[in-house]
């Protein structure tokens, strides 16, 4: 994808034709080996880092005039700082091995037309004084580029959402994990929708059922009538959608039982969104034995004169919590029975989505993406009172 971006966009291609050492790293456009003058009037080299705004594989005009710089604060030829571009000095960690010490601001009246305009403008500001001291100092190095992997990792296109707001380093904490989603009903499908937008290595989907008309009304997206007529398997239907974005979707059109627990081998983390029973007990046992962390979700609903009331639950099981003597067993392993309104496939897409969101947020807390001051491993949300209750804090 990196090479494709340079070949498909005139502004990026022109930077390389002009001799600048530019690369795409994560969701950033990076210009390396830019000469600058340090405070002691020594010519050194640093790196300019710009966020990158894309529409598919096409660049758009830069969405910000700010740029970051990895190096000392650049100075004029006499050693005084180029104060006109000063914006912020901080340790910026963008992930993908990119860090910076400064943010610069220089905005033309009409803004930057494209990335060639933006990068060359900043390169001139930073490198100009260096050429006064050393006439050979230039950012146009015409360096032969190393082999570039024509890939964007697990995604089919560059993930720019994290990098444009500076959370690339946090997002990287989710990378490499092998995730299972067991059960693609209302809540499981929303879990997939959110996990597919993270850089996990694999998302293994388990469900033996067909995607039918009632599923369409409590799932993300909007299937067409023709798609519903085909009655596809849920795992195939969802893979066809999310594989457009994420390369690691694996469809397993089976229910996990005592007879095929080997299907769970290699899983680091699992979301359980399925009815209680013997199969669920076997799944929990198998994941526990292989040291995986899991989150089990569920809801109990009832219909009364005032409308639907109920409770949503998110329960986390980690190797650490399982090692605590006499720890309460919060994951229900017995079915809810015929009186359980939710078991009738009641259409509550909003509650399905909320249950999934609470589970994904907890997963991201466990990974260090979100701050977790409570450290709870069991929480419930009561619908009628809008009450969130946390239990099982360390």
Image (cartoon, rainbow, N blue to C red):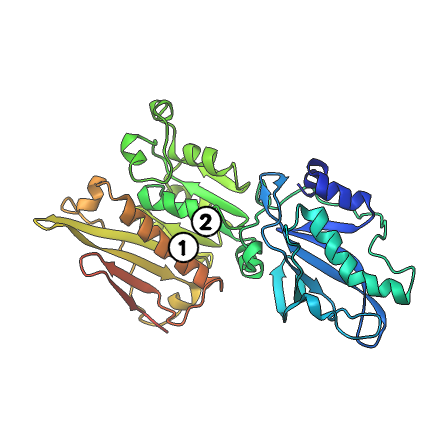
Q: Do the residues labelled 2 and 1 touch (CB within 8 Å)?
A: yes
Q: In which quarter of the image is residue 205?
A: top left
- Seen in the image, is 37 located left or right of residue 250? right
Vertically, is 37 above or below 315? below
x then y, percent, for residue 224: 37, 27
The disc placed on residue 11 is: none
- Residue beneath the point at 49% across and 62% down: 369
Q: Quadrant of residue 230?
A: top left
Front in this rendered view, residue 351 or 326: 351
Kindly identify which residue carries mark 2: 195
- Seen in the image, is 302 located left or right of residue 172? left
Residue 243 in sight: yes
Specify the farthest residue to the right.
135
Kindly identify which residue carries mark 1: 360
Question: Which of marks 1 and 2 precedes in the sequence?
Answer: 2
Q: In which quarter of the image is residue 210?
A: top left
Residue 257 in sight: no
Q: How crowded is mark 1: few (under 14 residues within 10 Å), some or many (20 or more)?
A: many
Vertically, is 74 above or below 122? below
Front in this rendered view, residue 193 or 234: 193
| Cα distance in 3D space between marks 2 and 1 | 7 Å
């Amino acid at each position: 994808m990196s090479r494709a971006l340079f070949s498909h966009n005139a502004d990026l291609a022109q930077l390389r034709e002009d001799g600048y050492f530019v690369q795409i790293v994560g969701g950033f456009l990076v210009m390396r080996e830019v000469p600058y003058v340090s405070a002691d009037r020594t010519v050194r080299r640093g790196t300019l880092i710009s966020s990158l705004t894309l529409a598919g594989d096409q660049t758009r005009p830069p969405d910000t005039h700010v740029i970051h710089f990895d190096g000392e604060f650049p100075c004029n030829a006499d050693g005084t700082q180029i104060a006109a571009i000063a914006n912020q000095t901080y340790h910026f960690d963008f992930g993908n091995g990119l860090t910076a010490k400064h943010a610069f601001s220089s905005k033309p009246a009409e803004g930057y037309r494209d990335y060639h305009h933006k990068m060359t403008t900043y390169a001139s500001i930073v490198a100009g004084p260096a050429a006064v001291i050393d006439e050979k100092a230039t950012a146009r190095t015409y360096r032969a580029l190393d082999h570039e992997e024509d890939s964007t990792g697990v995604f089919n296109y560059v993930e720019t959402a994290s990098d444009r707001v500076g959370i690339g380093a946090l997002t990287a904490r989710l990378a490499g994990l092998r995730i299972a989603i067991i059960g693609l009903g209302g809540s499981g499908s929303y879990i997939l929708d959110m996990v597919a937008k993270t850089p996990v290595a694999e998302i293994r989907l388990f469900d033996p059922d067909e995607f039918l008309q009632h599923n369409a009304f409590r799932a993300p997206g909007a299937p067409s009538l023709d798609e519903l007529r085909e009655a596809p398997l849920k795992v195939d239907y969802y893979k066809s959608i999310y594989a457009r974005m994420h390369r690691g979707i694996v469809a397993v059109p089976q229910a996990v039982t005592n007879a095929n627990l080997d299907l769970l081998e290699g899983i680091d983390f699992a979301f359980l969104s399925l009815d209680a029973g013997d199969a669920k007990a076997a799944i929990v046992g198998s994941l526990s034995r292989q040291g995986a962390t899991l989150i089990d979700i569920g809801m109990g609903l009832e219909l009364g004169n005032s409308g639907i009331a109920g409770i949503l639950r998110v329960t986390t099981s980690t190797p650490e919590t399982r090692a605590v003597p006499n720890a309460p067993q919060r994951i229900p392993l017995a079915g809810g029975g015929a009186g359980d309104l939710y078991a009738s496939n009641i259409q509550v897409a909003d509650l399905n989505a909320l249950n999934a969101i609470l589970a994904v947020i907890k997963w991201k807390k466990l990974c260090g993406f979100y701050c977790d001051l409570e450290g709870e491993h069991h929480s419930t949300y009561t619908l009628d009172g809008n009450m969130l209750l946390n239990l099982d804090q360390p």
